[in-house]
Image (spheres, rainbow, N blue to C red):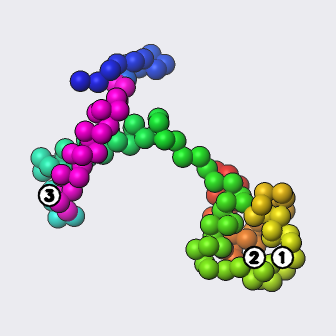
Amino acid sequence: MFQRYNIGGTDMAKITKEQYEFALARIEELLPMVDDNTPANDRNAVELTMMSDVVIDYEKEHYPIGKPTVAQLIQLSLDEKKMSQKQLASEIGVSPSRISDYVSGRAEPTLKIARLLCVTLGITPAAMLGY
């Protein structure tokens, strides 16, 4: 069913696009049959988990999601909080042009400012540091 390939001495199945598309379609069929009250060993729940794993593995390989930059984190948080760059600047005590520099990627915040950004915008320190 799956193409086989070897990674570091481990034999792995390579998921094809056709298998991925089949799994997506099957997930759509299974979702209405499984809910939070469905036992984990239910046939449909097991199949849903297996199909989900196929989709996850395929998407990790073909559609990797990179970590956001500091600039993207700040902009996303501003958008989520419906806050302007000017409001943020006022709250953390820097100039609006400095916030613009951070959002555009022209400058990186100092650790002190990064801490204030994390507290004010609700960004985790790990995300701010790129972990």
At horizontal 84% and vertical 80% (from top left) the residue drawn is 93
Question: In terms of secondary structure, where does tag 3 sit?
Answer: helix
Question: In terms of secondary structure, where does tag 1 sit?
Answer: helix
C-alpha separation, residue under disc 1 versus residue under disc 3? 52 Å
Please state the horizontal and vertical placement of residue 45, each as a whole percent of the image: 18, 51
Can you tell which mark lies on residue 122?
Answer: none
Q: How many labels does the image show?
A: 3
At horizontal 28% and vertical 45% (from top left) the residue drawn is 24
Please state the horizontal and vertical placement of residue 121, each as a whole percent of the image: 66, 74
Can you tell which mark lies on residue 96?
Answer: 1
> Which dot, 1 or 3, sits closer to the camera?
1
In front here: 8 or 75?
75
Q: How crowded is mark 3: few (under 14 residues within 10 Å), some or many (20 or more)?
A: few
Can you tell which mark lies on residue 33?
Answer: 3
Judge from the rendering whether residue 105 lies leftward or rightward of residue 119; answer left or right: right
Main secondary structure of the magenta stretch: helix
Q: Mark 2 points at which residue?
A: 85
Q: Is residue 13 above or below residue 21?
A: above
Instruction: Give yes or no for residue 103 being in the magenta stretch.
Output: no
C-alpha separation, residue under disc 1 versus residue under disc 2? 6 Å
Quarter of the image where one finds residue 91? bottom right
What residue span does the magenta drawing correspond to? 13-35
